[in-house]
Image (tube, grey):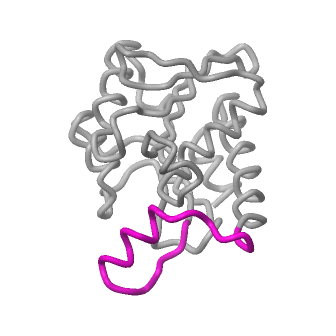
Amino acid sequence: MKIIVGLGNIGKEYDQTRHNIGFMTVDAMAAKLGITFKQEANHQALIATGMVNNEKVLLVKPTTYMNLSGETVGSLVRYYQLNLDDLLVIQDDMDMELGRLRLRMKGSAGGHNGIKSIIAHLKTSEFNRLKFGIAHPKHDQRAVVNFVLGKFKAEETITVQASLDRAVAIMEAFCQGTSMSELMNQFN
């Protein structure tokens, strides 16, 4: 089984915002697989279950809000006794240009509170990530908060959609058993 967690914040006010690109990415995968999300109170998440080449796949949107994402991820990993090689976390990254995708097998939180929470709950920083570039406002800290919680501009949506399509291809290959090393060579 594979678990793919898209990071974001629950609620209409956060829909389609830069910080919710993780949710948007798993939504795109769910649409491709023709599956829908259902509330899973035990894991504090919306979960869509599907199959990719006879491999069970859980697409997950934590309902804990971004800064507590580790509660959901930790709960799922323990419940399913998941090998961390079978986990992929999708996060926004404002230090990368808009639409750039980068796979990593480990690393620090880099200031991302959702990743910081996951590291704390898994007690390791060695888990697979797909970083999705959302760009940076290049201003002071107040501008950063407004920026990441802001929606994409109309002229940015073509870039975002093309990257979502690439992210779906990455997730499909991950679910089919392609190793992270191979994925990194192919897509980074």
Viewport quadrant of the N terminus: top right
**Residue 34 location, x and y as percent?**
77, 23
**Residue 70 location, x and y as percent?**
30, 36
Q: Residue furthest bottom?
A: 139
Left or right: residue 31 compared with residue 73: right
Viewport quadrant of the C terminus: bottom right
**Residue 153 location, x and y as percent?**
65, 71
| Residue at 65% over, 37% down | 27
- Does the magenta portion include 168? no
- The region drawn magenta spans 134-156
| Residue at 43% over, 86% down | 138
Tell me if residue 1 comes above or below residue 142 in the rendering. above
| Residue at 56% over, 58% down | 132
Number of marks in the rendered image? 0
- Does the magenta portion include 149? yes
**Residue 102 location, x and y as percent?**
57, 59
Given residues 16 and 8, the one toward you in this image is 16
Quarter location, residue 117: top left
| Residue at 57% over, 63% down | 151
